[in-house]
Image: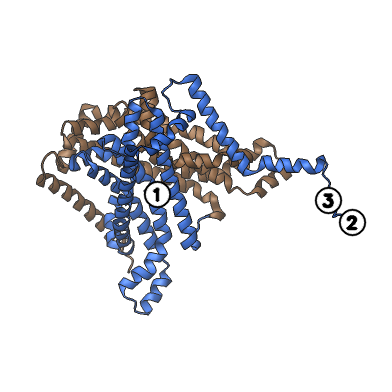
Chain colours: A brown, B blue
């Protein structure tokens, strides 16, 4: 395999993207309207949404929900995980339960939340929170498990107080693991956001997809899905960037 | 009679024993479990309406629900759909992933599509899938495959690229056929990656199946939960959640065991 030059690499990528667009367009013309809409029609309805302000409003709704849930998850998951890093008996007592909750498909809890809390903003935030909090917690605890006792011993030998110990040993050590959790939380939270918008009170981008499917407006639905796909890609890149940014700290065990 | 010298049985010797017992992981874990269950029970009794699921209520109805043929059929339907979807995605994903990993052209052509579909929340395409397959079990199967396929593909691709170059060179020197290179070198070398992909895929597939059942209303654990929680039978619905968690956790345990038993060199920790 000879190393391709920069030019040919870009050409293949561009060709593949163009081919994808062409397949999308042609598939739309070959099938019925309700089955698949051509790319041109999809972009047209996207432009319409953007012009009418619908897109901006719904995206803002979705974002508010997503960010509230995610922020809440990080703000609770990270400190609790760090606390478990410090207090050994608490970690031993709880780690299996955290692992179990991490493995629980949280979508299964949506019907309970619906019938207990009804419609509104709070239950939806709770859904995003539940989707996102356990990856952060689980990964922080995993990091805590691998913290080397010598590090804490050395800190103690130098008479470092509890505050310095947190700032100089615990937080820097667990941060890279936590960032892996944050990356997972970013992806899972997005699933939670769409699920909440589908199954609790309809709102945001989820509602746009639903409306498209109910009105047999396939182009509109595809436009909304396209936005979510792009959002997912962007957020995943952001998560990966964050993780790599802190991964260098891990050093020896990676 | 020369009795063996027994250790002192004063408070100095008894106390460590007691402390050991308190600090043993088993004691800590089971105490934490009991405390959590009591907290749940107490909170629900004090603040929540009576239909909300609580441990005592779940225990009371657990055996009847587990023995209910309707429930068993639902559990079977969901788990079977997940297993079938995983198997199909494993075969297809491995093929596509290996092709992407070993053929540069394929990789460059498909990478964007695979990565972006991997990042897509599968819930978002539910309406589209029901449009194509109708409101039936096929739609659930399609969602499960969509949920599982891309994580396996990405991992298979990474695995195929991580094969040490020397192995391939040796195979080449001995004039190995492409078929043999694939099955004797690339496949075993990328197994750890594949297993990681399957593990990730299993969780996603389970979520996909449940979500599809919510949306499409076909018999299964997801629909069982939806139906029972709508009729305010939360205890019954929660049994289905327990079965889902048990399925997820036991799959994880199975994968761990498989890794330790057959791939001891690939342990990550």
Residue labelled with disc 2: B1
- For marks 3 and 2, the one nearer the N-term is 2
Query: Residue B6 got which mark?
Result: 3
Q: Is residue A190 left or right of residue B216?
A: right
> What residue is drawn where x is 32% and y is 61%?
B98
Instruction: Place residue B206 in its image quadrant.
Output: top left
Q: What is the spatial separation of the Cα atoms under label 3 and label 2, in whole angstroms?
A: 14 Å
Q: Are marks 1 and 3 in contact (CB under 8 Å)?
A: no
Asked if badges 1 and 2 are on one and the same chain, I answer yes
Instruction: Place residue B244 in its image quadrant.
Output: top left
> What residue is drawn where x is 24% and y is 27%?
A53
- For marks 1 and 3, the one nearer the N-term is 3
> What residue is drawn where x is 37% and y is 31%?
A110
* Residue B134, above or below A125: below
Q: Which chain is indicated by disc 3?
A: B
Q: What is the spatial separation of the Cα atoms under label 1 and label 3, in whole angstroms?
A: 55 Å
Q: Nearer the viewer, residue A205 or A93?
A: A93
Q: Nearer the viewer, residue B44 or A62?
A: B44
Q: Label 2: how many residues lie within 10 Å, few (<14), some (14-19) or many (20+)? A: few
* Residue A43, above or below A55: below
Residue labelled with disc 1: B200
Q: Which chain is indicated by disc 2?
A: B
Q: Position of residue B101 (x, y in %)?
A: 34, 61
Q: Position of residue B76 (x, y in %)?
A: 33, 44
Nearer the observer: mark 1 or 3; the answer is: 3
Res A86 visible? no
């Amino acid at each position: 395999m000879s190393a391709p030059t920069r030019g040919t690499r870009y050409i293949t990528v561009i060709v593949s993207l163009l081919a994808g667009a062409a397949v999308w367009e042609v598939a739309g013309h070959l099938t019925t309207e309700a089955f698949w809409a051509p790319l041109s029609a999809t972009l047209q309805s996207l432009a319409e949404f953007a012009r009418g302000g619908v897109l901006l409003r719904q995206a803002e709704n979705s974002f508010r929900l997503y960010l509230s849930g995610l922020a809440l998850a990080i703000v609770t998951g990270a400190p609790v995980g760090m606390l478990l890093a410090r207090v050994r008996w608490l970690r031993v007592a709880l780690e299996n339960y955290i692992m179990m909750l991490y493995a629980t498909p949280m979508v299964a809890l949506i019907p309970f939340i619906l019938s207990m809390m009804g419609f509104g903003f709070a239950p939806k935030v709770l859904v995003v929170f539940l989707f996102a909090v356990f990856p952060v917690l689980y990964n922080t605890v995993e990091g805590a498990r691998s913290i080397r006792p010598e590090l804490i011993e050395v800190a103690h030998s130098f008479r470092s107080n509890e505050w310095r110990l947190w700032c100089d040993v615990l937080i820097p050590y667990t941060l890279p693991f936590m960032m892996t959790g944050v990356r997972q939380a970013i992806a899972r939270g997005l699933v939670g956001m769409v699920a909440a918008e589908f199954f609790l009170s309809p709102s945001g981008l989820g509602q746009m997809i639903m409306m498209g499917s109910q009105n047999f407006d396939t182009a509109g639905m595809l436009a909304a899905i396209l936005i979510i796909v792009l959002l997912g890609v962007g957020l995943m890149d952001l998560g990966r960037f964050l993780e790599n940014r802190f991964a260098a700290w891990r050093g020896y065990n990676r | 009679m020369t009795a063996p010298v027994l250790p002192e049985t004063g408070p100095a010797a008894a106390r460590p024993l007691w402390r050991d017992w308190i600090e043993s992981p088993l004691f800590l874990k089971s105490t934490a479990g009991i405390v959590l269950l009591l907290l749940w029970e107490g909170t629900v009794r004090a603040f929540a309406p009576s239909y909300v699921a609580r441990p005592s209520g779940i225990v009371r109805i657990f055996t009847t629900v587990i023995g209910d043929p309707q429930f068993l059929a639902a559990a079977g339907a969901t788990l079977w759909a997940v297993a079938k979807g995983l198997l199909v995605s494993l075969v297809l994903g491995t093929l596509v992933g290996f092709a992407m990993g070993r053929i540069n052209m394929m990789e460059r052509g498909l990478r964007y599509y695979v990565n972006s579909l991997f990042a897509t929340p599968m819930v978002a395409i539910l309406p589209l899938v029901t449009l194509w397959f109708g409101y039936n079990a096929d739609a659930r199967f399609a969602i499960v495959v969509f949920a599982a396929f891309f994580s396996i593909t990405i991992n298979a691709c990474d695995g195929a690229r991580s094969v040490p170059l020397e192995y391939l060179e040796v195979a080449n020197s001995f004039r190995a056929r492409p078929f043999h290179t694939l099955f004797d070198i690339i496949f075993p070398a990328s197994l750890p990656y594949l297993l990681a992909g399957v593990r990730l895929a299993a969780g996603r597939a389970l979520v996909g199946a449940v979500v599809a059942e919510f949306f499409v209303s076909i018999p299964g654990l997801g629909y069982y939960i939806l139906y029972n929680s709508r009729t305010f039978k939360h205890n019954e619905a929660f049994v289905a959640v327990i079965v889902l968690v048990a399925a997820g956790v036991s799959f994880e345990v199975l994968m761990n065991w498989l890794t330790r038993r057959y791939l001891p060199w690939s342990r990550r920790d």
